Amino acid sequence: MATKININGDIQDEAFISILDHGFLFGDSIYEVVSTNHGKPCFLDEHLERLFASASGISLNIPSSKNEIKDQIQTTLDSAGNSESYIRIIITRGVGEIDLDPSSCLKPNIIILVKDFPQIPEEKYAKGISVALVSIKRNSRDSLNPAVKTGNYLNNILARVEAAKTGAEDAIMMNPWGQLTEATTSNLFFVIDGRLLTPDKECGILSGITRDKIIQLANENGMPLEEGKWPGEELLKAEEIFLSGTVKNIMPVSVLDNRPVGNGKPGPITRKMMKLYSELLENLNPA
Ligand SMILES: Cc1ncc(COP(=O)(O)O)c(C=O)c1O
């Protein structure tokens, strides 16, 4: 169970970054989190595609190709030797003047952190977690676009802090127009009248890779699914709610604003999707 950090090709057990890096000073960075499945990075092409899209979203030129980054990820995984790993790829703007202008930063830093995959207690999947619909808004698409996965999560941190004050484990945010968006590090799905619903990308969300796979699975398995725009209050009518993301996969939500969702247990559509998703992962790289 080792943690290894690769900074610009140099792999270490512990690593340090200059405080003059604009990633540290201003949150001027982008990142991806990839999990392994049977030891191999899962949906890596999709994650690298999004990493490069995020880079272009903040006008940052990544000084390596996708293949070079893939090679570095594999070398870091080999060096850590974990059975399953959490991989975090971070690209910072680099060291520059203490000034917002990024033009003084000559070289982005490419950091690949590999650690043992964090185990989420089985009980959470069996019982579901609690969430709160918070007053902190997800950024609008014409400010820091939520589709760009930057190292600046302060907005989502504030949402999480607000949720924690009500005793909830995560927050669901609306956009400035009161439409549902997503949770702080995951996408949102809910069920009304037996239909699976998820906020549209136009509402201002990260286009989750797990979300895409769920939409694909729903379509392939004849489960009615709609991407759309719904006011926050709509969530109160949900019979089922779940969240999706790379680390948690599919996490049922059993409590919304301190009230049970449906009968307070993960519902049939959530359980069916959890099963389909775990089969998808199992079949990716059979052991
Ligand atoms: C804000 C936000 N939404 C959604 C997700 C889920 O995305 P993915 O399924 O690609 O992990 C994440 C993951 O980190 C996230 O930070």
Image: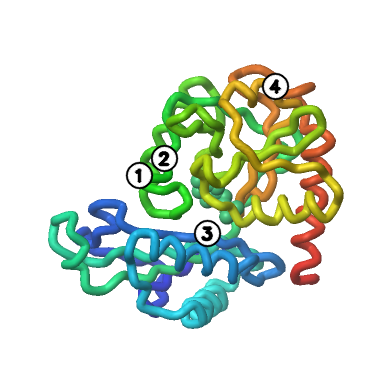
Amino acid of disc 1? Ser
- Residue 260 x/y as whole percent: 70, 20
The residue to which callout 3 is attached is 33
Tell me, yes or no, whether the two marked residues, 2 and 4, touch with CB atoms within 8 Å.
Answer: no
- Camera-nearest residue between 208 and 164: 208
State the residue position of label 4: 237
Q: Which mark is residue 143?
A: 1
- Amino acid residing under circle 2: Ser
Q: Quadrant of residue 43?
A: bottom right
Q: Residue at x 55, y 78 (%)?
A: 74
Q: Residues within 10 Å of mark 3 (few under 14, many from 20)?
A: some
Q: Nearer the N terminus, badge 2 or badge 3?
A: 3
Q: Earlier in the sequence, mark 1 or mark 3?
A: 3
**CB of residue at label 3: within 8 Å of ligand 1?**
yes
Tell me the CA gap for discs 3 and 4: 32 Å
Q: Residue at x 18, y 59 (%)?
A: 101
Q: Which residue, given by chain and number where applicable, does mark 2 sit on?
A: 140
Q: Is residue 81 above or below residue 264?
A: below
Q: Quadrant of residue 197?
A: top right
Q: Position of residue 210 (x, y in %)?
A: 65, 54
- Residue 214, percent across and down? 72, 51
**Which kind of residue does numbered mark 3 sit on?**
Val
| Amino acid type indicated by mark 4 | Lys
Q: CA gap, disc 1 to disc 3?
A: 23 Å
